[in-house]
């Protein structure tokens, strides 16, 4: 989700395999975020070499100078190993070169992302345009680090410090694509009350608004705020994102409590696009939206 950031379920008779994701078992979306394929593979190699060497996790932990918990997390694909771990494990497990080579293919992109969000995150990185409507919280792509940390610290069940840091790193990593893709249009429509919801102290709130204003300054980023007085509108069913693929296909994504949904059916996506465009005309202009955020900052 944007809160917990998905391998996704799909709609309109489109199977998970057709969507480019593995099938999702019933109830699977309620579990903890899944490790990425590259991390699982690396972890399996570490475990196989360790067992071949006749070492327990405790034994290997002592040799590589990390905790047994860290060794277990790496083997289960839950933790990105640093270079020191790779080098020490390589030397301890036979110096075959297998771990060094496997480490070259590790991907941080999905670490800390919830299982139901990962497929959408992959699509985001290839999209030629991305539209986001949000009514619950500041969109992940616009969140300050302090705001994102507060969001993750407030989730239930509580996260370990390791899980929280992984989620925070993933959130900040996603924002890089906005800076690295200056010709891709990013459009955001956010409800005013989202920016009025307090977190932390006044300094933290000012930091959030400064961060949002900074990220929305480039020409390819458009931020529009739906004012409180706008009343009811067509997007009240909940947050939604719509993107266009390099092939010109439009896909949508929506999410709720502990789940996310990739929407591929053209008719359903068309309806969501119509709703978004209608709301765009009802929201404040980008300039007026920035003026509103600057006024909110001045009130702190």
Image: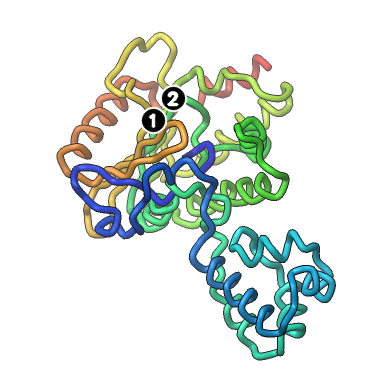
Element marked by disc 1: loop
Residue at x 65%, y 18% (from the top left corner): 298
| Residue on which disc 2 sits | 135
- Left/right of residue 122 with respect to residue 96 in the rendered view: left
Residue count near mark 1 (Cα–Cα under 10 Å), binned few <14, some 14–19, many ≥20: many
Q: Nearer the viewer, residue 243 or 226?
A: 243
Q: Quadrant of the C terminus?
A: top right
Q: Which residue ends up furthest to the left in the rendered image?
A: 267
Above-or-below relation of 200 to 40: above
Residue at x 65%, y 48% (from the top left corner): 163
Residue count near mark 2 (Cα–Cα under 10 Å), binned few <14, some 14–19, many ≥20: some
Element marked by disc 2: loop
Above-or-below relation of 116 to 49: above
Q: In the rendering, at what x and y percent does residue 240 appear?
A: 35, 34
CA gap between label 1 and label 2 equals 6 Å
Mark sitting on residue 95: none
Asked whether the beta carbons under mark 1 and mark 2 sit within 8 Å of each other, the answer is yes
Q: In the rendering, at what x and y percent does residue 124 appear?
A: 40, 52
- Left/right of residue 201 with respect to residue 184 in the rendered view: right
Q: In the rendering, at what x and y percent does residue 283 appear?
A: 36, 22
The quadrant holding residue 223 is top left
Of marks 1 and 2, which one's residue comes earlier in the chain? 2
Q: Which of 277 and 164 is in front in this view?
A: 164
Residue at x 25%, y 25% (from the top left corner): 278
| Total tally of numbered discs in the picture | 2
- Left/right of residue 137 with respect to residue 49 in the rendered view: left
Mark sitting on residue 239: 1
Residue at x 26%, y 30% (from the top left corner): 277
The quadrant holding residue 233 is top left
Q: In the rendering, at what x and y percent does residue 88 appear?
A: 77, 78
């Amino acid at each position: 989700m944007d809160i917990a950031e998905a391998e996704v379920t799909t709609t309109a008779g489109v199977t998970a395999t057709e969507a480019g994701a593995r099938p999702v078992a019933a109830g699977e979306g309620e579990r903890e975020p899944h490790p990425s394929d590259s991390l699982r593979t690396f972890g399996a190699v570490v475990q196989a070499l360790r067992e071949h060497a006749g070492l327990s996790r405790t034994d290997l932990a002592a040799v590589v100078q990390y905790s047994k918990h860290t060794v277990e997390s790496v083997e289960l694909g839950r933790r990105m190993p640093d270079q020191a771990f790779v080098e020490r494990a390589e030397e301890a497990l036979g110096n075959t070169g297998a771990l060094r080579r496997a480490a070259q293919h590790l991907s941080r992109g999905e670490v800390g992302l919830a299982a139901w969000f990962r497929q959408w995150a992959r699509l985001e990185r290839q999209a030629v345009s991305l539209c986001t409507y949000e009514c619950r919280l500041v969109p992940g792509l616009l969140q300050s680090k302090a705001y994102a940390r507060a969001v993750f610290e407030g989730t239930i069940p509580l996260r370990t410090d390791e899980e929280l840091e992984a989620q925070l790193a993933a959130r900040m990593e996603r924002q890089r694509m906005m800076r690295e893709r200056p010709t891709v249009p990013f459009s955001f429509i956010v409800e005013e009350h989202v920016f009025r919801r307090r977190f932390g102290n006044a300094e933290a709130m000012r930091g959030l608004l400064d961060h949002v204003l900074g990220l929305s300054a480039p020409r390819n980023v458009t931020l529009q705020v739906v004012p409180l007085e706008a009343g009811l509108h067509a997007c009240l069913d909940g947050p939604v994102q719509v993107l266009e693929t390099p092939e010109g296909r439009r896909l949508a994504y929506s999410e709720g409590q502990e789940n996310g949904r990739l929407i591929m059916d053209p008719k359903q996506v068309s309806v969501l696009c119509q709703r978004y465009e209608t709301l765009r005309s009802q929201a404040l202009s980008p300039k007026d939206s920035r003026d509103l955020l600057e006024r909110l900052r001045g009130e702190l």
